[in-house]
Image (cartoon, helix red, strand yellow):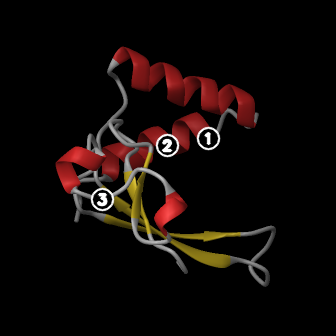
Amino acid sequence: MLGNLDRVAQNMKIEALGDRAKAQAAFDEAEKNGTRVKPEFGSVFYHIQGPDKDRGRGHVTVAVPGATAQSLGLPDNARGGTVWIMNAGTTTAHLMIPGE
């Protein structure tokens, strides 16, 4: 799916600021002023996170921009121990899947 290329390009540009606090501030400002590129609803991002390739672990993100507990019928917190919506109501809303 090519629909997320603009989102990924924006992510990389902001993350290239190098400083995590500055990058988060830039993400927050883009969200606030409406310039944050929305991902394709239902698209899946696969990430490898860790200090190096030998200690990386997989992480799956299912994008649901703008989704809320009311719109999807899923909780917006992890207390239920099931799939839940993180960052509900924002362009970064995504499904958290326990065990992933």
Tag nearer the camera, 2 or 3: 3
Amino acid at circle 2: Asn
Label drawn at residue 74: 3
Which residue lies under the disc numbered 2? 11
The reply to whether callout 2 and callout 3 are in contact (CB within 8 Å) is no
Marks 3 and 1: CB-CB under 8 Å? no
Residue 7 against residue 64 in the figure, above or below: above
Q: CA distance from mark 2 to mark 3?
A: 26 Å
* Viewer-proximal residue among 69 and 3: 69
Mark-to-mark CA distance, 2 and 1: 6 Å
Which amino acid is tagged 3? Leu
The residue tagged with tag 2: helix, strand or loop? Answer: helix
Image quadrant of residue 6? top left
Residue at the spot of label 1:
15
Q: Crowding at label 1, few (<14), some or many (≥20) Cα neighbours within 10 Å?
A: some
Residue lying at the far front of the rendered structure: 80
Left or right of 44 in this view: 50: right
Quadrant of image for the N terminus: bottom left
> Front-most of 43 and 18?
43
